[in-house]
Amino acid sequence: MSDEIFKDIEKLNISRRKLLHVMGGSFIFFLPMLKCLRAEALTNPSKRFLFVYMPMGVVNERQEPNFKDQFFPDVAGRNFTLSPILSPLAALKSKLIVIDGVHINSRDRRSLAMADDGGHVAMGNMLTGRYNVGETSNRLGPIMGAYGGGVSLDYFLSQQASVVSGTAVSMINLGVNPLAEHAYERSISYSGAGLNNQILPYNNPVAAFDRLFGSMNLNSNSSQAELDRIRLKKKSVLDVVIKEFNNLKNILSANEVSSIQDHMDAVHTIEREISTVDTIPTPEQSCTPPQKPQDFDIYQSNLYKANLQFEKIMKVQFDLIETAFKCDRTRIATILIESEGSQQQHPFLASRIGVAPSAMTGHHGLTHNPPSHWAKLTEIRKWYMEHVAKLAQNLNAVNTTSGSMLDQSVIWVGGVLGRSYPVHKNHRVPTALIGGAGGYFDTGQSIIIDKVREQNVNNQWGISHTSILSAIMNAMGVKQSTFGDPRFAEVPFSKIVKAS
């Protein structure tokens, strides 16, 4: 019971002595609740959310002879084999959900450029679940609905005190390749509708580092100094209770003090137990503040150097997210590896598939070319997943009082394009969830929505990606039925939610 509470009580003309004397007997019954409060605090560690954007579709076209899907597993259920793209996640299969049959139903078909489908412009729909707004144009004609039509999920979560309380940075958006053909391709995050509310990612690792760790004391003793500072800021409820007990000893009779002595002993026992809990790796203790990364010329004009730099930036950006999560600097993050339309080249992957580096031409161009390029596209996406897998495995190695840090988190790998050849489609988009979000998700399964693998079937047989947005919102502890435009927003997809 704090001094502020007593001050409020005194406004009612009730003396502190009288109050304590009257409640002397009943006050002791509050103490067993402390164990419950302690248990609740220890068994409900903070949750973390990362969205990884996979651009330009996945190799899942089934109209070619002898085709084997490169992203989605062949069978549904729990006894499934990971596809080539998802193979880096083999060690985490039990913590994975893959869904074949998710579509972007909030993409817009109003413009000439999207007469068949939403195409690249659906980037703005990905995390907002709303029709896009604004207008731009390209070689095909006017593009209506180019920018996100509302708040994106990451921004929404960053505004929830229950999700981000205690963090230094409410959310972080990172990028790897800063080049975008159109302004709408620069971001997937929005604080509101339209171009002016785009939240641009940190494409330079130095800027990302400064945002995440700039306020930390990064001297030679930075890790311990930061931990001490954090712990000093966190005043225990038990300290207040013990203080009030000492006051009681001076006010109550000897018999009354004796009657509560057992509870005082219990309080001190709980205090010792809590100090012991500090030996369990908490986020702060799992944190080793990183070295500041080298400065990159992110708009490198030399194509060869730019391609090699892309490989390095990819690693640094994922490492920054991992460390920020472990240090509890932030709990909400997105990473936009490449935008739709990116012509990023990946010559460093050529040797994996036995081709010359010069054969790894612009990414977007590869997606529109015949199946002879599918091996290259598969390798690029597998390389993406290797970085996701490394981050997930490292989070899985951090123990909390309720499983690993990955068990308390969810990583969503997704994008707005399924088929990319010969034209882009917003059906059967890549959808993989890693981590249980504190037991919310029923992990370790492959889900195939009925009929989505039949030839010439459009998205009426799939589920809306808003059902994934809604599920993640609820998994993070924000209890609302849907997220996105009420006209087509769906409740959390029941097959991925663990039965309570």
Image (cartoon, rainbow, N blue to C red):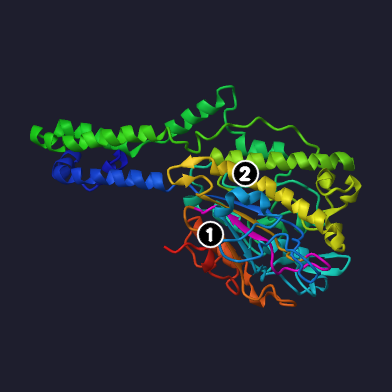
* Residue 225, horizontal then vertical, whole percent: 51, 26
- Residue, disc 2: 391
Q: CA distance from mark 2 to mark 1?
A: 22 Å
- Residue, disc 1: 473
* Residue 252, horizontal then vertical, whole percent: 13, 35
Is most of the magenta stretch helix, strand or loop? loop
Q: Amino acid at mark 2?
A: Leu
* Residue 38, horizontal then vertical, whole percent: 34, 43
Which of the two discs, 2 and 1, sits closer to the camera? 2
- Range drawn in magenta: 420-437
Quadrant showing the N terminus = top left
Residue 316 can be seen in this image: yes
Decide if residue 232 is on the left or right side of residue 300: left
Towards the viewer: 424 or 83? 83
Q: The residue tagged with tag 2: helix, strand or loop?
A: helix
Which numbered marker is on residue 161? none
Quadrant showing the C terminus = bottom left
Towards the viewer: 82 or 339? 82
